[in-house]
Amino acid sequence: MENALAKKPHVVIVGAGFGGLEAAKKLACAEVRVAVIDRTNYHLFQPLLYQVATAALSPADIAAPVRAILSKCRNMEVILAEVQSVDVDAKKVKMADGELGYDYLILATGARHSYFGHPEWEKLAPGLKSLEDAVEIRRRILMAFEYAEKISDEAARKAAMTFVIIGGGPTGVEMAGAIAEIARYTLAKDFRHIDPSQARIILVEGEPRVLAAFPEDLSASALKQLVDLGVEVRLGVHATDLTEAGLNIGDEFIPCRVKIWAAGNNASFVGKTLGVPADRVGRVLVNNDLTIPGHPEVQVLGDLANFLYQTGQPLPGVSAVAMQQGRHAARNILAMIEGRKPQRFWYWDRGSMATIGRNKAVADLNFVHFSGLPAWLAWLFVHIIFLVGFRNRVAVLFQWAWAYFSFNKGARLITRNFQAETRPPA
Amino acid sequence: MENALAKKPHVVIVGAGFGGLEAAKKLACAEVRVAVIDRTNYHLFQPLLYQVATAALSPADIAAPVRAILSKCRNMEVILAEVQSVDVDAKKVKMADGELGYDYLILATGARHSYFGHPEWEKLAPGLKSLEDAVEIRRRILMAFEYAEKISDEAARKAAMTFVIIGGGPTGVEMAGAIAEIARYTLAKDFRHIDPSQARIILVEGEPRVLAAFPEDLSASALKQLVDLGVEVRLGVHATDLTEAGLNIGDEFIPCRVKIWAAGNNASFVGKTLGVPADRVGRVLVNNDLTIPGHPEVQVLGDLANFLYQTGQPLPGVSAVAMQQGRHAARNILAMIEGRKPQRFWYWDRGSMATIGRNKAVADLNFVHFSGLPAWLAWLFVHIIFLVGFRNRVAVLFQWAWAYFSFNKGARLITRNFQAETRPPA
């Protein structure tokens, strides 16, 4: 590294999700030295993760190598490592294999799903945050049909063809809709001893409506669209007592092989190591300029931050918030370097959308709500525009077009340990 | 299943590779009942597996669900299971979870790589037969560069940037060329502490020339094209003493982190359970009509068969042989059902090709040999034509075009257990 570069202020960005990556792009080729640390080598387009889990897309379609995205400017370094803690007094982040000092820190390590005090449920009902999660869920869904095809016991077959999704937010709604479509259309003709279209897909939501963060009319529309797809929606009840054999929904025991968790998030453990106040789910209570109390050189954003100042409610854990905060944090750093103060952050809410299936979606653009085909087209348009990298955008568009016209999903592979599990000793 | 169907002769096909799948297609909607058994749920286009291992393609691009391929005809059943043995007297195949009787059997379970009596080398130098293998090799290659970027020890860094491919057949040549291209072009600008183009790629071949099954002029051309790409080719020496730290090539110890095995095959263990003579690598010695001695109802083909009758040499383990044998075996069964005898098999050799990199390949069309760009275009054309399924063909074409014009590889993901390995205890 050249000497001139070594003397510039050192910005460390932890996490290459939507927030961290936007901050890094804003600082590319600026008068700072930047290190981006992530525990994977790719930026993940999380809003489409459910499409990997439901065999419509391949992992590489929704992931782009962080190094390639940030390779242009020589002031930008990418480090593949997992940050374990931050020492705000020594101004250092600690990784498994070393530590790294910073002048300015942007912490954007996101969230994992939370099981409300039942960590043992994670194995029974995986959540959907990483590519590994998605491939594992895809494997479970496809294997359930394979298992049902093979066994003759009627009760076991029914349990294998029952899919329960716990949590009726956008991820739960998308998963329920996508599994219903696989069963009704994609797999319809592929089996000889079962009829996949008879699969039971149950969506459980503790609140009295699905998509509780959306306006009520769109919740009602999403419910209707789910029911049209044959999804059973159970509202105002909770899933409890998960076992291999099934789970309780309210007072009823449902025998069920595949359970998917979409019910709640906990912020990343790195937030706790800052030593500043956090909320119930571990989100750091940030100042109105995204800095943390007593440390203007540290900014926290995205799913790891609880930002209260605009509405009195924490901003939602969506990509738009993280991206705007990422750009804002980068601007704050450039301002501080020039001796100015960090500025207050304002979120510009352009609305939100959720998709349910082919031609089925809801969209809330604040000034107007819509449902069905127009919402679905809007969803499609926005997701293609935002997908990182030209290649992914065209590849995904192509696969969607193919899936749309053929009702076929392209990535129906059961991989991972399947071969290892079944290979007999040589 | 309808009663009429149940009374028809039952054909069991084990293995949905090139041979088994062709046989199944030929028997689709014929007057037989067919069960296709495979231990994966997809047909794999193995000739492009090295492109998954080198991050150019995604697993789903070269794999198509067997059920979807064979769903049209109701006489066709697909079973996801691993066959462990065949009882030729009882006419049954045995699986982990049951057995299945047959009237006619086509056994096409292929081959795995063989480590010449050193099974402990498999972990050190994975071979390339399955999607799991390919994703693991991709992970190792990409992680080697990540590791080299992080460490300061010069010797360890050099070892991390040394890649040894053992075996100079088509797979070894393709892997060596593809790794050289990744290092020289794809990753060239992505790191700050290493220069990926300085990576050392060594191809080891025990014979005095690479592509020993090709004509000598094409071996010489392939060697030149490899050297042009910066691959070190070591001929007439063997790799021995593999360890984590490196391996011996002839008398020289080469410190090296990533070793890839492309040196030899052993036929599937299922062949041994037939109780008929096999060759040194476990291939069943079949009659000239593909049946086995004493059991005309059992046919063995593809990489599992040693077919000697045409040239006195066993036919090579390539997809063209397997596909022609698959169609022939299906025709034999239909003949036997009508009371006729199985016919002698003749292989129509249309030539062979191997690719080395962008614009680099060799092609032997028997009457003419060519190299470089024309051979590469021919290779491209043939591989696109033969890829199973319309969707894969277009998707792969698109990704190749993108890679060609941008020098970028689309599937540079380090997945699998990477997160699990690095996550600290909560």
Image (cartoon, coloured by chain):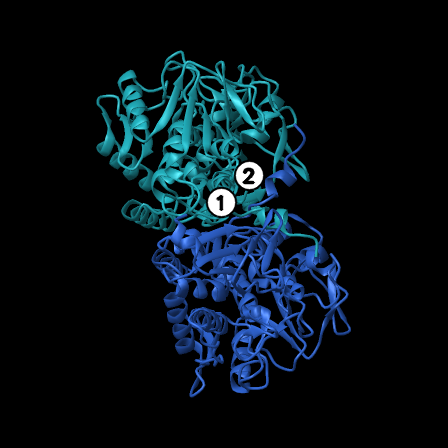
Chain colours: A cyan, B blue
Q: Is residue A75 above or below residue B215?
A: above
Residue drawn at point x = 37 percent, y = 58 percent: B389
Q: Position of residue B50 (x, y in %)?
A: 52, 62
Q: Is residue B5 above or below residue A128?
A: below
Mark 1: which secondary structure? helix
Three-letter amino acid code at the position of disc 2? Asp
List the single residue furthest toward the top. Answer: A312
Tag 2 residue: A38
- Residue B161: name its quadrant: bottom right
Three-letter amino acid code at the position of disc 1? Val
Residue drawn at point x = 55 percent, y = 42 percent: A40
Instruction: Specify which label sits upstream in the sequence, 1 or 2.
Output: 2
Q: Position of residue A335 (x, y in %)?
A: 44, 29
Position of the C terminus of chain A by quadrant: bottom right
Tag 1 residue: A66
Q: CA distance from mark 1 to mark 2?
A: 9 Å
Chain designation of label 2: A
Q: Is residue B221 something that shows in the picture?
A: yes
Looking at the picture, do discs 1 and 2 lie on one chain?
yes
Q: Are marks 1 and 2 in contact (CB under 8 Å)?
A: yes
Chain designation of label 1: A
Q: Position of residue B1 (x, y in %)?
A: 41, 48
List the single residue furthest toward the bottom. Answer: B367
Crowd around label 2: few <14 · some 14–19 · many ≥20 (10 Å): many
